[in-house]
Image (cartoon, rainbow, N blue to C red):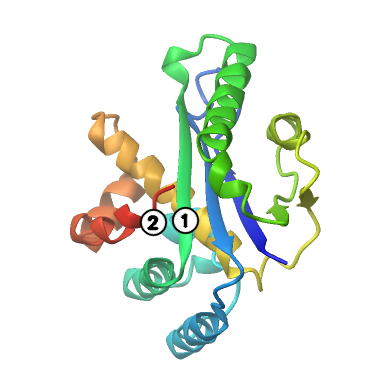
Amino acid sequence: MKKLKIYIDEGGDFGLLAKSSELYIVSFVIYDTSVSINNDISYLNNKLKNIGYNGMIHTTPLIAKRDEYKEMNYEVRKKIFLTLFFFCTRVNIKLKSIIIDKKFNNNKETLKNNLKKEIEKMYINNLNYFSKFDLIEIYYDNGQINLTRILCNVFKSNPKIVFIKDFNHEKERLFQVADLLTNLDKYIYKRKRKIKLNKNELYFFNSLELKKHLLELKNKRL
């Protein structure tokens, strides 16, 4: 049986108030299970263990030096980030991010409709690829009810698709890659459009010199 796994993470919120996020982003990490990545995951886990951290990687607090990372210096956090990033460049996966800029969406319904259209477009444009698989597992933990409803509406017509909301976030490293991609593509979008970066983004990403590394993800884009 040919099986595809899709890991989904989101960043931002559906609010339009002053304190709400400027962008809403949904990231997809797509993995064809016919190519094993077990050795890559073992290598990743060993690298993290050598750094001194082998838990789940939460990219947002990692960048911001919050929560479980608040006692870690920049060098350690950078090593954790780059270890996951280079794992992403090595493994056989496809990547896709959808970004909705709220300045072009003046109410919540418009935002939701535009997000649904973009996800539908992604699905339809790649239907030939998706149709090759006997089973498609979508890993999303129902973190936001609005996105959950959109995903169900877009994919409900395909009987090969099943949703998995209960899974081990710590062990599913590809879910953590989706979280990393959410932050990375948000930064790229803001930088290209000269949207003001927060101090954590400026410090963390500029110090990582990501420009030369981002080309390594180009061929992985869906």
Q: What residue type is labelled 1?
A: Lys
Q: In the displayed structure, would residue 1 be above or below residue 37?
A: above
Label 2–label 1 contact, CB within 8 A: yes
The quarter holding residue 104 reads top left
Q: Where is residue 194 in the image (x, y as percent from the top left)?
A: 23, 30
**222 sits to left or right of 210:** right
Distance from the alpha carbon under mark 2 to that under mark 1 = 5 Å
Can residue 63 be seen by looking at this rendering? Answer: yes
- Could you tell me which secondary element the residue under label 2 belongs to? helix
Above or below: residue 78 compared with residue 178? below
Q: Which residue is drawn at 39% across and 45% down?
A: 185
Residue shown at 20% from the left, 60% from the top: 209
Q: Which of 176 and 118 is in front in this view?
A: 118
The disc placed on residue 94 is 1
Name which residue type carries label 2.
Lys
* Residue drawn at point x = 66 percent, y = 56 percent: 133
x and y percentages locating residue 130 in the rendered image: 60, 48
Which one is nearer the viewer's eye here, 41 or 4?
4
Q: Earlier in the sequence, mark 2 or mark 1?
A: 1
Q: Can residue 197 be seen in this view?
A: no
